[in-house]
Amino acid sequence: MVELENIPQAAREQIQRMGAADVVIAIAAASGPPELERVAASVRDALATLATQAQGVILHAVPEFESGVADESGAVRILSYPLFKPEPAEDPLQNVSAARQAAFAVAEKLGARACAWIASDTGSVTPRWIHGLIQPVLDLDFDVVTPCYDHHKFEGLINSSIIAPLTRALYGKRIHHPMGPDFGFSGRSLERLLARASANRRARTLVTLAGDAISAGLEICQSHVGVRANPPTDWPNLSSLLARILGPLFIDMEQNAAFWQRIRGSESVPEFGEPTPLSDETGAVDVQHMIESFQLGYGNLREVWGIVLPPATLFELGKLARLPADRFRMPDDLWTRIVYDFALGHHHSAISPDHLLRAMTPLYLAWVASYGLEMETASLEDARQRLDRLAQAYEAGKPYLLSRWRWPDRFNP
């Protein structure tokens, strides 16, 4: 666990001088003074809307280590001192995890009743954004607030096709964006999350945070915070992105298996705020390259896929690879079984984790192509309903996951 004594002395002295704060806003994105002051203005506006008066501190959690600025004036104070010394690590998540744990430790020291972790670009942050993350904690006594971002139907598809429906099926909570990356926390939840991070030597990522919170019995809700500026998809490095996201998620399935194996069905969680109206996207989606990548993967990776995918699934993929583009559709139950089988392959250590996760890329592209063709002329609401049906398929397929997880030698479809 990160202790205050481990935080660099310059920052520790400023924290001691600040004494106390009701709200701590930790900014994880690189930001200069103008951006931090703009966030401070949003925080001031958000605090003014709360039922009770509150003072806030903004922590710039990951500035350059050599810099240090403190503004202790007004109801919202800014601390832009480094909270930890970044280490040259092979896994960049180590430093992100260290920054978050350090911010939590500072919030505990200041006696904060609420702490918000902001990892999105600060240009997206508005008073509504801040209010949505802290108001349910301060006024309604929730422990964890996850964000509801508004986005178009072809954005955030890794979350929509894997993270959100898998979290829903495993943990029984219908959370739209369980991987955030922006969250609100109660003061009392920080101790439990820090203790959980201390008990696990690996870096705790934002992908696993919702599962951690649900397993710990924390009261969780979600808030509509507005439109998030999603970075463009880095298609050439998609394999690395999937490995960085799915690796921690599958490891978390191992650690929380005793919990999620008892869960049946799902339920909604309290939801606050209203979605931002968005216009429907126009134009076609170029899926030809995705289909060709899948067909190439089917030709080159069948032996690898065969280590984790049952013969029946490989047979279905063979039929899919031969379909013309206008009929290219991946059924929900097929995609669900693929995700579950890769999680099982990770669980049973069938091959090296990195090799396994990267081999999933052509299959994910096949799902994106199928979804893109099906939703090409659909409205945003139609797309939301379509993704909800996919989430229901994950729930319906959970007995398949449970059977192969518990009895891998006895269950081979």
Image (cartoon, rainbow, N blue to C red):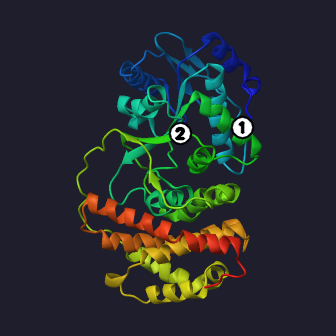
Image x and y of residue 159, in percent: 47, 57
Q: On the image, which quarter does residue 133 sit in?
A: top left
Please name the residue that numbered disc 2 is placed on. Answer: 219
Per the image, label 1 sits on a secondary structure element best described as helix
Say whether residue 196 is left or right of residue 386.
right
Q: The C terminus is located in which quarter?
A: bottom right
Vertical relation: 52 (above or below) 42: above
The residue shown at (48%, 60%) is: 165
Instruction: Give the numbered dot on residue 16.
Output: none
Amino acid carrying label 1: it is Ala
Residue in the image at 46% along x and 13% along y: 75
| Residue denoted by label 1 | 195
Which x, y percent locates residue 332? 43, 74
Q: In this rendered view, identify the residue nearer to me: 112 or 24.
A: 112
Q: Is residue 362 visible?
A: no
**What is the crowding at mark 1: few (fewer than 14 residues within 10 Å), some, or many (at least 20)?**
few
Q: What's the residue at 72%, 74% (across, down)?
A: 350
Residue 259 or residue 179, whichever sits in front? 259
Q: Mark 2 packing: few (<14 Cα in 10 Å), some, or many (20+)?
A: some
Q: Observer-nearest residue: 369 or 266?
A: 266
- Image quarter for residue 153? bottom left
N-term-proximal mark, 1 vs 2: 1
Q: Position of residue 372 (x, y in %)?
A: 35, 69
**In the rendered image, which quarter is residue 404 located in?**
bottom right
Return the residue nearer the eye: 387 or 169. Answer: 169
Q: CA distance from mark 1 to mark 2?
A: 17 Å
Could you tell whether 58 is left or right of 305 in the image? left
Give the answer, above or below, for where 262 lies relative to 187.
Answer: below
